[in-house]
Amino acid sequence: MSPAAVEGDGADGLALIKPAVRAQAAYTLRAVPARRKLNQNESPYDFPVELKRAILERVALVPWHRYPDFAPPELLARLADRYGWTPEGVLVGNGSNELIQATLSVALGPGDVVVAPSPTFSLYRLLTGVLGGRYVPVPLGTDFSYDVERLIAIARRERAKIIVVNSPNNPTGSALPADGVERILQATDALVLCDEAYQDFGGPSALGLLGRYSRLVVLRTFSKALGMAGLRFGLGLAHPVVAREIAKAKLPYNVNLVTLIAADLALQHAPLLAARCREVTETRDRFVARLSACVGLTVFPTAANFVLIRCEAIAAAELFRRLYDEHGILVRDVSNGGELRECLRISIGTPEDMYAVLQALAAILPTMPLARKA
């Protein structure tokens, strides 16, 4: 059968979609092949092959015609032990993005205000709009550092229902000060959603505050530091009574059995995966130190597995193009006419990847010193 023809312009169907949804731009990223792919903040190291084999062996023994547990008790216990929290307050999701959506869904009503730093992860604004809320961005400092008092002042002025903080923040890499989250909780009556997707690479954590504040939700992911981006596993930690309500917004059986098994094995081999995370962090620090020697680039402080740069000697779009066309290096062009003007974000890969970036920059920019291999 040939594909059916699409008739009309779809106006009748489109009219039934909420205006707040139609006003949003979908979160998407076109897949582009590259010799060195440094545009999505993924781990440069694949999941260990010996653990892959162990996962496959366990998957082969599990009945596929039966639904998996919503969250196996053994896995919840391991997660609770790893993050120092109670199993009753642990949520698992199909990536931490699902738990962002679930948390906003259960708390946000039409017209309710979400306050978040700017720039930050675009999904917060998208989901707020889809749910009919009002999104209020709070600009970060000129060096993209958090201004906690400004965030609090605007949240109080706008009577924010939810305050989202991303620490370390994407795409800037900036981390919230150690007492920042507690100061926000003390000074407002909002639900505070602390997205710590990149915390394994540096910066303070809000986990220690969970026992004192039931208005705090902390999110983590296995996609970055643990190399499980392709399997999609995230978790949330909250007071058990709040976690119970957030769970109502998750779809049944939201995490598939392969991912559940992989997450469990990852926790059992945490030291191996933590060593890989340390390698990324050490590579980042060496790369940032060398990158900072280039006149014509502003390199912003970062606690994540990426670094944000501002191009001054060349347009960001031109540098992005030449890195890809001439050297096969794909980074993320985040430049816009506002806070991120002329900015590129570079994910941290292997030492070889970052040496190649430095060599490419030296070829493109006369102000970039030629790098030597570490």
Image (cartoon, rainbow, N blue to C red):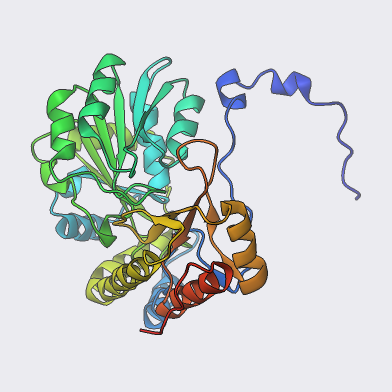
- Position of residue 280 in the picture relative to residue 216 (left or right): right
The quadrant holding residue 210 is: top left
Answer whether residue 223 is visible to the viewer in this image: no
Q: Which of 316/368 is in front? A: 368
Q: Which of 56/291 is in front? A: 291
The quadrant holding residue 318 is: bottom right
Answer whether residue 55 is visible to the viewer in this image: yes
The quadrant holding residue 244 is: top left
Count of numbered labels shown in the rendering:
0
Q: Position of residue 279 (x, y in %)?
A: 30, 75
Q: Residue at x 24, y 71 (%)?
A: 270
Q: Position of residue 105 (x, y in %)?
A: 39, 29
- Position of residue 165 in the picture relative to residue 45 (left or right): left
Q: Which of 238/132 is in front? A: 132
Q: Is residue 152 shown above or below 101?
A: above
Q: Residue at x 71, y 23 (%)?
A: 14
Q: Is residue 157 shown above or below 268?
A: above
Q: Which of 36/15 is in front? A: 36
Q: Position of residue 272 (x, y in %)?
A: 27, 77
Q: Is residue 370 shown above or below 31?
A: below
- Position of residue 102 in the picture relative to residue 23 (left or right): left
Of the 4 image quadrants, the one containing the C terminus is bottom left
Q: Residue at x 52, y 47 (%)?
A: 342
For the view shown, which residue lies furthest in the left direction?
Answer: 212
Q: Position of residue 58 (x, y in %)?
A: 39, 74
